[in-house]
Image (tube, rainbow, N blue to C red):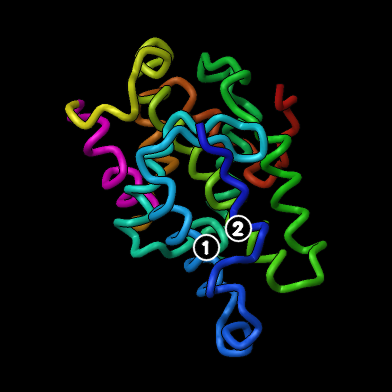
Amino acid sequence: MIILMLLTSASSNAMKPAHLSEATMDSLISDLIEENIIENKDKEVTLNGLYLDMAPVIYNLYMNNNFQPLWMDEANSQLVNDIYHMLENSMQFGIDPKYFSPEYLKFIQNDIACQRKVQKKAIRATQFEFLMTHTVLQLYVIMEKGVQYYEDADFYNDNDIYIQQLPDNLLQSIQRKNLVNTLLKSQPDAYSNHQNSAMNNAVIIELN
């Protein structure tokens, strides 16, 4: 198992001061995403103590998106809030919150703004990208296929058609701004509750 620390050693060309003067934050994050995907694809990955059992799907999704960040995009800020709201109310969907780590996810998101150095801010943002994507993939699979499928699935298995199609399906849902509706299609009883609830609540759930 490889411990993915997202270039805290600052060995990447993306972290050189000369590059920083020309790059935007998004391009820095994109560089970090690409480097980590290239180095760690097909390996078992732990990010800050959290085992990313869906690492190959995460990597394929970002490769299909040209390594561009998904959740740091201001256009998706409401979607992030919607996901937090769904996690906070996961019991309404019959899902045990033990499968998610939103408390730590929220901590990482808030800590981005606390970083004074651009390098550290980009590293923290990339950690948030991977962790948020992992959480959304968990939610996506459990709501579509059920807990038992998620627990039994081998996300390193290239022969599973559902797993093969998962990166494209999730990416399209995000790009088309219908991810929440896609998730809720498999939970019709919860749909009206979700639509009638406030969508900007933060979620606090224990990581371990």
Residue 102 picture quarter: top right
Structural distance between the alpha carbons of marks 2 and 1: 8 Å
Please report the residue visible at 35 percent of the width from the left and 39 percent of the height from the top.
42
Residue 165 picture quarter: top left
Residue 73 is left or right of residue 20, and the answer is left
Look at the picture and state if 49 lies above or below 33.
above
Q: Position of residue 46 (x, y in %)?
A: 56, 35
What amino acid is at disc 1?
Leu
Q: Is residue 166 covered in magenta?
A: yes
Q: Nearer the viewer, residue 97 or 195?
A: 97
Q: Position of residue 65 (x, y in %)?
A: 34, 60
Look at the picture and state if 191 lies above or below 108.
above
Please report the residue visible at 51 percent of the width from the left and 74 percent of the height from the top.
27
The boundaries of the magenta stretch are: 160-174
Residue 53 is left or right of residue 208, and the answer is left
Q: Earlier in the sequence, mark 2 or mark 1?
A: 2
Q: Which residue is mark 1?
A: 32
Look at the picture and state if 96 lies above or below 45.
above
What amino acid is at disc 2?
Leu
Q: Nearer the viewer, residue 35 or 23?
A: 35
Task: State yes or no: discs 2 and 1 in contact (Cβ < 8 Å).
Answer: yes
Please report the residue visible at 56 percent of the width from the left and 83 percent of the height from the top.
23
Q: Position of residue 154 (x, y in %)?
A: 33, 22
Please report the residue visible at 34 percent of the width from the left and 50 percent of the height from the top.
171
Look at the picture and state if 70 lies above or below 181.
below
Task: Find numbered disc 1 in the image and state the secondary structure of the residue it sits on.
Answer: helix
Q: Which residue is mark 2?
A: 7
